[in-house]
């Protein structure tokens, strides 16, 4: 091949490429010949010293170029060498340039490499005048040698299509050199990073952890109750590490916050094989959270001994949401447990709420000692816990006044100085206005429900002089997002520019965000994180898009940063992906971050990782994935983005769970059905004008109001739906002015008419303590409904226990099958939550099938 790529038939392609580049702007894209970002050499370069501060050569590569220079000098006439040595040095050292890939037309592994870097025309013409014979000593390309006598053809062959990158013009190009080696920010200050797909096909991945045992495995937990093992090469073991899906309380419905929520390995896991899990449990209307201890199997280090479970702690949950879910071990060796405030809105439990009540375990950060618990108590109280000896407080409490902390992490500290080590960061999901990030410290009060973010929520409680609460280090309004997902401070090795950057996100808006502390003032500077524009992420294996519902963050054993998101936040839809965060501007020197994983004996079959996501070329940076095209997705994203397991936007109600909601701002693809109708206090999508029917009501009940009119609560049924939570009446007044129990009784007296029953409470509720039979009007509404299994998979019937027991995929429904919406023989199934069985007079729990073809969501309900 000649000194440049073969150009046959490339004229039109070249023109098109130039037009694309102009449209994108001359965005800097430093890249080395190994198709990765440049770096700072570990020691100064002796030969190509101009690239000692930043470039693409290690000292070994620099020495190799020096030897090549000496070999050329030995072959060239001394008189010529005196004139041409400088040109030879320039050309050889371009392999060390931060833009070497551009200079050698090698921006991906599929393109052939130039033998001489791309030269600017004036430089080439000057070199041709005196040193044209030098090219045959620098390049083995005989086609290039043949052009030595023709100045125009030679320089045309050595030119670049993108003249911004030709040598030596790129040395003085301000756009390419002004922020070289720094994280690139767009005009709005949004940091441009890239992603690498690490795992896919996961069902609501809620946690990614490592065992700190030197194996560099990582473990990904699904909300259903399964944990998978991934090896350092990203292959997954076919057999799950842990499967407690039969015990875990969750459902396939989008937005259900219950399920398997947390996982932590004991600091001495390598020796004692202990791990701890946090999950939801329920029987009938009673629900609670459970923290259990397991041990790894003696026969297989990649499997848990399921018979080894010991329940360490259980806490009753008065509602289905705000379940917390984080487990962490600190440097002190103690287990930290993060609980939610108990659910509903405004923490309505007791005089001051659970969060401010130090005698309750909800709305707290707990700290316990689980070492040496083989005999005696299952856990002990650390002697320095702040409320030990306080008769009005539980000794487990470490900090209080939290609403629903979703994802917390300990700072590993600066790799060189250790600064920041042990700081505890948490994202606390808010109520109506603000999301916040807190630095959790021993014995401190974080303000809820007196305060939300920086503002008062309960003004009377907020004015209490004894509150002594701690303000968050950062809070953001709901116009940026409605459900914070806490992250990590980056302390990995591979991307030095990110050191000290706290990265977090928002489940609803899909935003990735960051905070960096000013060490002098202690103030935190906010920057949004965007997917890089133009060529910023144009590296092999990197992508610039992600699913919008950011569920959790994680780090591997080496400290590299990851996050998990999904396109449909259902515990049974396999749209979850794990992404690794990449800084395209600078990496660590080659060889510095190599790991030596300890060998692990594998008994299960390996499933090798196959990436599915693709790089999408965009003309501008994208801070959120809200409208990114998603290709090859078997199931469309939800019309209304639910909240996931970690806490809904404040004051709204997620589907099937009281206490959350959303405005649809994070859905990846806008719904083509803009027509809406209002019925029984709920909003429903309609297929066409004139077909205004509640899509999920029994027997297709018509809408109560016409399209576009204000929403109303027309009857006792609507009030009953809004006032009843898991069979327990709340204190909210009904639309008729009566308190809920009265309306509730009225509906019961009417045999719970079809209107009342189709007002779909978060769970089917008892009408009275004595009435447990299915109303005849409900039983009469037997409209069959068809639905497809998620991801197009063929799955079993409504009963899931058999498949779970076998460790198989969580079954829902056979593709295209139908289920009677109301059937006395199978029960009135409502979003996988409790259902009533006709005849037997018993309440049971059962997980139902996938989503209805149409959905009728509660809209902005303040429970």
Image (cartoon, helix red, strand yellow):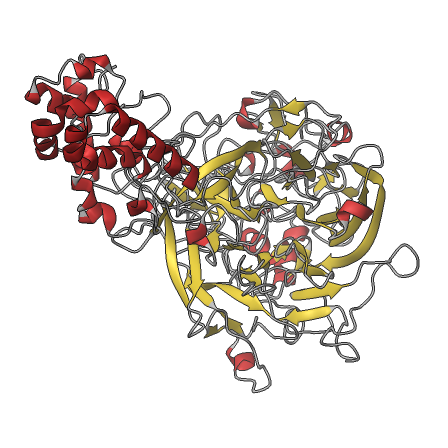
Of the 4 image quadrants, the one containing the C terminus is bottom right
Task: Indicate the position of residue 811 as horizontal and vertical percent values.
Answer: 66, 28
Residue 575 appears in the picture as rendered: no
Viewer-nearest residue: 167 or 255: 167
Quarter of the picture holding the N terminus: top left
* Residue 57 x %, y %: 38, 39
Look at 64% across and 74% down and name the residue there.
Answer: 356
Quarter of the view holding residue 693: top left
Location of residue 403 with respect to 834 vertically, above or below = below
Q: Is residue 255 left or right of residue 224?
A: left
Q: Where residue 819 appears, x then y in whole percent?
A: 62, 26
Q: Is residue 245 left or right of residue 852?
A: right
- Report the side of 329 relative to 371 (left or right): left
240 shown above or below 582: above
Measured from the top left, where is residue 334 in percent x and y? 74, 62
* Nearer the observer, 635 or 514: 514
**Residue at left offset 32%, top offset 21%:** 111
Task: In the rendered view, tell whether residue 536 sits above or below residue 491.
Answer: above
Q: Hey, which quadrant is residue 64 in on the image?
A: top left
Based on the displayed image, in which of its 4 quarters is residue 314 positioned?
bottom right
């Amino acid at each position: 091949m000649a000194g440049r790529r073969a150009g046959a038939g490339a004229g039109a392609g070249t023109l098109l490429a130039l037009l694309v580049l102009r449209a994108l702007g001359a965005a800097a894209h430093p890249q080395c010949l190994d198709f990765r970002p440049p770096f700072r050499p570990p020691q100064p370069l002796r030969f190509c010293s101009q690239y000692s501060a930043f470039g693409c050569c290690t000292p070994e590569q620099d020495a190799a170029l020096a030897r090549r220079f000496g070999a050329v000098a030995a072959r060239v006439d001394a008189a010529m060498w005196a004139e041409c040595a400088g040109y030879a040095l320039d050309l050889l050292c371009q392999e060390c340039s931060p833009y070497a890939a551009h200079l050698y037309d090698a921006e991906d592994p599929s393109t052939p490499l130039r033998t001489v870097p791309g030269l600017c025309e004036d430089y080439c013409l000057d070199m041709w005048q005196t040193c044209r014979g030098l090219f045959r000593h620098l390049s083995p390309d005989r086609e290039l040698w043949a052009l030595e006598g023709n100045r125009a053809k030679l320089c045309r062959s050595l030119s670049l299509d993108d003249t911004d990158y030709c040598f030596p013009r790129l040395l003085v190009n301000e756009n390419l050199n002004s922020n070289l080696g720094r994280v690139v920010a767009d005009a709005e200050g949004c940091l441009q990073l890239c992603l690498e797909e690490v795992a896919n096909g996961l069902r609501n991945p809620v946690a990614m952890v490592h065992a700190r045992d030197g194996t560099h495995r990582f473990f990904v937990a699904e909300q259903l109750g399964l944990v998978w093992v991934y090896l350092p090469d990203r292959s997954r073991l076919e057999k799950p590490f842990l499967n407690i899906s039969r015990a875990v309380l969750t459902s396939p419905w989008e937005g259900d916050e219950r399920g398997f929520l947390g996982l932590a390995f004991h600091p001495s896991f390598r020796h004692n094989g202990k791990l701890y899990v946090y999950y939801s449990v329920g029987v009938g209307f009673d629900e609670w959270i459970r923290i259990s201890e397991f041990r790894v199997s003696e026969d297989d280090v990649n499997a848990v001994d399921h018979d080894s479970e010991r329940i360490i702690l259980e806490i009753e949950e008065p509602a289905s949401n705000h379940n917390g879910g984080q487990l962490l071990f600190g440097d002190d060796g103690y287990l930290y447990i993060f609980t939610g405030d108990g659910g509903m809105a405004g923490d309505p439990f007791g005089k001051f709420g659970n969060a401010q009540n130090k005698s309750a375990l909800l709305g707290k950060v707990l700290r316990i000692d689980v070492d040496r618990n083989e005999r005696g108590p299952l856990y002990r109280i650390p002697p320095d816990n702040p409320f030990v000896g306080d008769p009005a407080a539980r000794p487990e409490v470490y900090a209080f006044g939290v609403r629903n902390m979703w994802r917390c992490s300990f700072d590993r500290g600066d790799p060189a100085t250790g600064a920041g080590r042990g700081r505890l960061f948490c994202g606390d999901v808010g109520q109506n206005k603000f999301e916040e990030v807190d630095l959790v410290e021993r014995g401190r009060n974080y303000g809820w429900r007196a305060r939300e973010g920086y503002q008062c929520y309960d003004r009377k409680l907020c004015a209490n002089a004894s509150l002594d609460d701690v303000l968050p280090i950062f809070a953001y309004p709901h116009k940026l997002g409605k459900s914070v997902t806490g992250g990590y401070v980056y302390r990995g090795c591979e991307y030095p520019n990110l050191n000290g950057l706290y990265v977090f996100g928002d489940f609803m808006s899909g935003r990735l965000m960051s905070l960096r502390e000013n060490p002098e003032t202690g103030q935190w500077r906010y920057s949004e994180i965007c997917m890089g524009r133009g060529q910023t992420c144009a590296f092999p294996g990197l992508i610039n898009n992600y699913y919008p519902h950011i569920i959790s963050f994680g780090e591997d054993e080496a400290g590299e940063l990851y996050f998990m998101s999904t396109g449909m936040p259902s515990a049974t839809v396999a749209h979850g992906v794990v992404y690794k965060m990449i800084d395209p501007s600078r990496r660590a020197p080659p060889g510095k971050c190599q790991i030596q994983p300890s060998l692990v004996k594998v008994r299960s079959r390996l499933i090798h990782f196959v990436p599915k996501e693709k790089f999408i070329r965009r003309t501008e940076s994208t801070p959120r994935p809200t409208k990114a095209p998603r290709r090859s997705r078997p199931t469309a994203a939800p019309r209304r983005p639910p909240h996931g397991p970690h806490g809904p936007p404040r004051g709204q109600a997620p589907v099937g769970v009281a206490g959350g909601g959303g405005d649809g701002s994070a859905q990846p693809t806008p719904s083509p059905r803009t027509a809406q109708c209002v019925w029984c206090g709920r909003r429903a999508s309609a297929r066409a004008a004139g077909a205004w029917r509640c899509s999920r009501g029994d027997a297709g009940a018509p809408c109560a109001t016409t399209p576009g009119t204000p929403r109303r609560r027309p009857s006792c049924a609507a009030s009953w739906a809004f006032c009843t939570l898991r069979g327990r009446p709340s204190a909210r007044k009904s639309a008729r002015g009566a308190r809920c129990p009265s309306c509730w009784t009225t509906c019961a007296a009417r045999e719970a008419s079809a209107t009342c029953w189709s007002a779909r409470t978060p769970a089917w509720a008892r009408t009275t303590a004595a009435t447990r039979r299915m109303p005849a009007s409900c039983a009469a509404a037997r409209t069959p409904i068809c639905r497809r299994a998620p991801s197009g998979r063929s799955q079993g019937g409504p009963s899931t226990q058999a498949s779970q027991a076998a460790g198989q995929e969580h079954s829902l429904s056979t593709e295209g099958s139908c289920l009677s919406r109301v059937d006395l023989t199978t029960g009135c199934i409502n979003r996988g939550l409790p259902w009533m069985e006709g005849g037997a007079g018993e309440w049971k729990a059962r997980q139902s099938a996938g989503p209805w073809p149409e959905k009728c969501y509660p809209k902005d309900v303040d429970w």
